[in-house]
Amino acid sequence: MKYTMKDITRSYTPEKRKKTSIWARIFSRPLSFLVTYVLINLGFTANMVSILSIFEAMLACAFLIIGGKFLPIGVALFLFWDVLDCTDGNIARVKGTSSLVGEYMDAISGYTAPAFIYLSVGVAAYRTTYLFPEYAYWFIILGGVASISDILSRIIYQKYVVTEYRLGMIDKAGNIDEERASGIKHIADLIMKNLTYSCLFMPMLVVAYFTNWFDLLVSFYAVYSFGVLVCTFALFIKKAYALDRKVKNHAD
């Protein structure tokens, strides 16, 4: 079956658009339609693209770490990773093959990127910085702090959701994802969505390449990611105590 561009763009529903970051709307998503058109008609499945994006993200980070003439390749590949991250969902919706396995593979790709990208930028900053060159190794440390903080925040969130699920309390307590659609939590979610590695970080990475400001970029995201980690820890500790009280009251 030959898929048309109209088939692909039609799958981008208003509901999906609302959940999309600003950067994805203006860059990654439009470009992903073209990539989707090529790959879907070559026989690629959504899961194949997700797997491809995992290795592509790791390759991008490797080039950033190597530096030199490979630095612009690393930047370009990471920008393209975000395009692939949109492409797998496009293919799943067009073919009607969305699945739990697909969501899982997409999540792995979304975890792989922050696990390595900030550390990679820290290494690039170490090689290019003019700020305190005698202490340049600190930018590698900051990159590690940013990557670890990002992943740890996600683990804390996922562990809480798994705990709710195991206790059979998701329907009673309300899924945490639903809370992100209202009030101050919705505003916080919008801020994080548009500051993350798949949004504002992308154009800032390009600027950093042309200005050698990798040091400023990794410093900003170290502070930002650590701040998110602290807030995430405090939020879910509070929720865990509340959940514990619910369980005890239910037992009584």
Image (cartoon, helix red, strand yellow):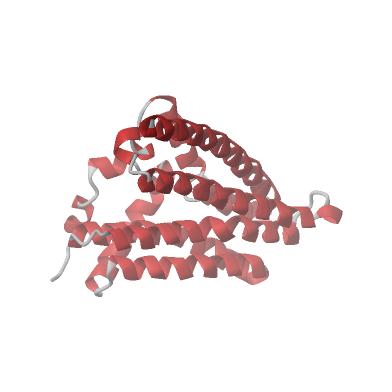
Please tell me in which quadrant of the rendered image residue 33 appears. Answer: bottom left
Q: Residue 132: in sight, yes or no?
A: yes
Measuring from the top left, give residue 170's x and y in whole percent. Answer: 33, 40
Position above or below: 211 against 235: below
The residue depicted at 17 percent of the width and 56 percent of the height is 6
The x and y percentages for residue 128 are 73, 58
Residue shown at 61%/38% (left/top)? 230
Is 146 placed above or below 252 here?
Answer: below
User: Extreme front residue here?
Assistant: 252
Residue 118: where, in percent of width, then height? 61, 55
Residue at 50%, 61% in the rendered image: 112
Q: Locate the N terminus by quadrant.
A: bottom left
Residue found at the far left of this picture: 1
Q: Is residue 206 left or right of residue 15?
A: right
Quadrant in which the C terminus appears:
top left
Looking at the picture, how far across and down is residue 22, in whole percent? 41, 41
In this rendering, position of residue 192 left or right of residue 44: right
- Vertical order, 62 against 18 (above or below): below
Observer-nearest of 103 and 120: 103
* Nearer the observer, 43 or 51: 51
